[in-house]
Structures are given as C-alpha cells and as structure tokens.
Image (spheres, rainbow, N blue to C red):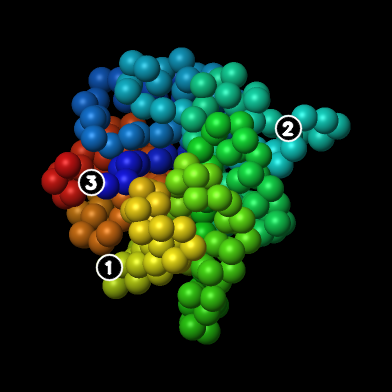
Amino acid sequence: MAQQLMIANWKMNKTHDQAKDYMDILAQERLPSQVEVVICPPFTALGAVAAGAKASLSMVGAQNCSWAASGALTGEISPEMLMALTVKYVLVGHSERRSLFGESDDIVARKVQLLLQSALIPVLCLGETEQERDGNLTEEVLRRQLDAALPLTSDEASKIVIAYEPVWAIGTSRTANGEQVTAAMQLIRHYLATKYTAATAEAIPILYGGSVNLGNIASLAECPIDGALVGGASLNPQDFANLTRSFAVAKEL
Ligand code: PEP
C-alpha cells in the first residue's frame, strides 16, 4: 500500500503567530500514526510550522517553490531554502498557481525535476476545469498533465505524490462524487502502471482534493484514494485532526 497522507494547504492564510498557535493546538491532538500529516503554510509561517512539527507528529510542506536552484529571481524561494526549514513535501501545479499565476505544464515539469534532484517530494496537482469535464475532456486533460510532468525514470516517479483536484471542486463545496473520484484514480493508476510498472503505480500515493470536509471524508475514503489535500477544512487544527482520524478509521488503518 502507498503511504497514506493528509495534507493541509493553508493557501494565503495565517501569520507566523497564528501558525504557532495552530501547531500548539495540533500537538494536543492524537494523530493516527499510519497517516502522514503534512502542513503547508505560507512561506512566512514555515519556521513556526517547522518548530511545532515534531511535537505534533506532523511534517512540513511548502505551497510552491522556484523552478531554479538559485539566481536573480526576485521574490522566488529555492528548494535549498525550503530544505533548511525541514520541508519534506512541496505542492506543484496547484490549479490556483496554474490559473492565476500562469504556471504552465512546462514550468510544472521543471519544478518536479528540481525538487527530485533536491530530495524533496513533489505533490503534483492535476485536474480538469468544469468546462473540460462538461466537454468530456477530463481524461485528455489528465493525460496531458501527466505526460508533461512525468518525463521521469521509474525510480524518480516512485518518489512523487499525485493529487487529483478537479478545479470545479476546489473551494466550492462541490465535492466530486465517488464515481468521479474512482474513475480519476483508476485512470491515473493505469497511466502509471502502463508507463512504469504495476508495482511503481501502487507505490505512488494518489490523493483527492476539492472541498474535502468532515461530512464527506468517510464516503471519499471508500474510493481508492491514499489520502486528501485539504484547503478550507484544514484551517482549524481540531477540525483537521478530526478529519485525519476519520480518514484513518474509514480506511481501517
Ligand atoms: C486545495 O487548496 O487544494 C483545496 C482542495 O481546497 P479546498 O479543500 O478548500 O477545496
């Protein structure tokens, strides 16, 4: 079985002090040991999350990084800088980065490569827009995004995490239904098994993201997902801990 993961994406929320408070509360919660819990704060709160990670048994994640190792890139953050703050996972190609900041498939691919070279774990985000789903283009879009991001060896591919996040389900309260989630998981798993091996495909965690909350996590866990990428419902530490425990119980971990 692939590593089971629950990843909190705070997006542009919480200051350094608010992050510290969050981590103090998370440390009071019992998180299931079979699920790796990852907190992705804004860059400015990475230090606070890193300081509280050990006590709360969670890992540190970043929401983005540069496609270059260093250089004259004002405002960018490199993998080396993230590693110095004990970051383990980095989101790549989140739909908000793709749609609001012009992140192309090519840039996503460069980031994935650089992160792997830096021994950081890329969490590759994929997903179709509502228009693409309505136009029956979901499969084509997912294949295009996978093709672009994975010119990787089998060894490299086995070190990534994939998050299927239909764009129309992110921050909208419109979670994808079980059939839609299962179909996407099967498509991605089959793509990986064909490109690499069945064993590699089984070892890569594939998460679901898009309006995950306490009310839908149990039914989502019935789908072949290895965890979730959670935005809004991760902003409260008790809620996020509850979500993580509910996932572990529903998966019988
Ligand atoms: C996300 O930020 O990746 C996300 C899925 O957000 P939300 O859970 O709020 O839909």
Residue 69 numbered tag: 2
Q: Amino acid at mark 3?
A: Phe
Q: Secondary structure at mark 1?
A: helix
Give the Cα separation between the discs numbered 2 and 1. Answer: 40 Å
Q: In the image, 207: left or right of 113?
A: left
Badge 3 or badge 2: first in the primary sequence: 2
Q: Are marks 2 and 1 in contact (CB under 8 Å)?
A: no
Element at badge 3? helix
Q: Which residue appears at 40% of the width and 41% of the height?
A: 7
Q: Position of residue 221 (x, y in %)?
A: 23, 55
Which residue does the image show at 60% across and 26% down from the upper left?
Answer: 82
Q: Within 10 angstroms of label 2, few (less than 14), some, or many (20 or more) residues?
A: some
Q: Is residue 117 visible?
A: yes
Disc 2 residue type? Ala
Closer to viewer: mark 2 or mark 1: 2
248 relative to 168, above or below: above
The residue furthest right is 72
Residue assigned mark 3: 247
In the image, what residue occupies the spot 52% across and 79% down? 137
Mark 1 Cα shell of 10 Å, populated few (<14), some (14-19), many (≥20): some
Residue type at numbered disc 1: Gly
Q: Is residue 178 left or right of residue 113?
A: left
Q: CA distance from mark 3 to mark 2?
A: 36 Å
- Mark 1 lies on residue: 178
Question: In this rendering, does residue 101 appear at all?
Answer: no
